[in-house]
Image: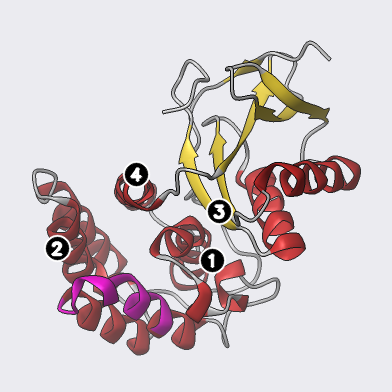
Amino acid sequence: MGCRGSSLTMLILGATALAGAPRLHPDPIRAGSQCRKAIEQSKTLAPEPRLRAALTGCKRLFVERGCQLAAEEAANAPSSKIVPTLVAGCREAYCPVLPEPRPSLCHRNLASQSDVSFLEEWSEFVLAVGKRDFGAMPVEVSEVMHQLVAELRRKLMAAERPRDAVAVYVRLADDGRLIVSMPSSDGGVLREWCTDDDPDAETLNQLVSAVRSATGQSKAVSLSSAPQVRFSSIKAVVETLRDAGGYQIYFSVLNDGGSAP
């Protein structure tokens, strides 16, 4: 259909006030400052030590004691248990008390998730927690947390993505329409769909059919999104592929030029 993509900057974690009365953090300024300082001071560390430093410095962001303890335990856990320990403990502490609709992480089968999958949905989870505990997650904290999560996700993606993963791109056309596409092996476009705003049901159904045809026995999809694409659009694609075929999604952000990283 002659669609052309453009990209700017996506902020997965935002500062949005929660309707109703949130449970306010007892010391938000100190907790936010400690978290930001821990993340910024660990910039020169390798991903795993940096994650451990962030967990130690940011555990007081959470009001629920169970999530604080999970962050503390995760900071000292074996490498393979860091992210699962954090997610399991914080999910148990927060999901029963968060308002509907609860974050996707509250509904996942933890046993079948990879660290990449956890990180894909962690930002949405923390946003919901921030709404409840702070009323609005401090912007300066959300920004450094987003940068850390994005960095860790890229590192894990490079290590975990199977070579036979089917590529799917999500980006915006110059007129703001959403473009979902599957590249061909020669660098062209195998399939492409254009839709207004979030992807519609017909587009998602056709995407699932195309992915099924392309994957064969593989259950891996490499989903790359332009930074400007809304989180709700990405979430719709991810959840459709997971629900329809049980695909493992490996997510990355496209470079500014719209090309794969």
Residue 121 belongs to magenta span: no
Judge left or right: residue 74 versus residue 147. left
Q: Nearer the viewer, residue 211 or 253?
A: 211
Task: State how far apart marks 3 and 1 are (Cα).
Answer: 22 Å
Callout 1: SS: helix
Quarter of the image where the N terminus is located: top right
Query: Closer to the camera: disc 1 or disc 4?
Result: 4
Q: Residue furthest right?
A: 202
Task: State how far apart marks 3 and 4 are (Cα).
Answer: 13 Å
Task: State how far apart marks 1 and 4 are (Cα).
Answer: 28 Å
The quarter of the picture where residue 244 lies is bottom right
**Residue sitting at x 71%, y 51%:** 236
Residue 166: x %, y % from top left: 59, 41
Q: Identity of the amino acid at label 2?
A: Ala
**Residue sitting at x 34%, y 44%:** 158
Q: Which residues are magenta?
A: 76-88
Residue 82 belongs to magenta span: yes
Which residue is disc 1 drawn over?
Answer: 128
Q: Nearer the viewer, residue 49 or 260?
A: 260
Which residue is disc 3 drawn over?
Answer: 249
Query: Closer to the camera: disc 1 or disc 2?
Result: 2
**Residue sitting at x 22%, y 68%:** 55
Callout 4: SS: helix
Which residue is disc 2 drawn over?
Answer: 53
Task: State how far apart marks 4 and 2 are (Cα).
Answer: 22 Å
The numbered mark, 3 or 4, whose residue comes first in the sequence reads: 4
**Residue sitting at x 79%, y 10%:** 2
Q: Identity of the amino acid at label 4?
A: Ala
Task: State how far apart marks 3 and 2 are (Cα).
Answer: 27 Å
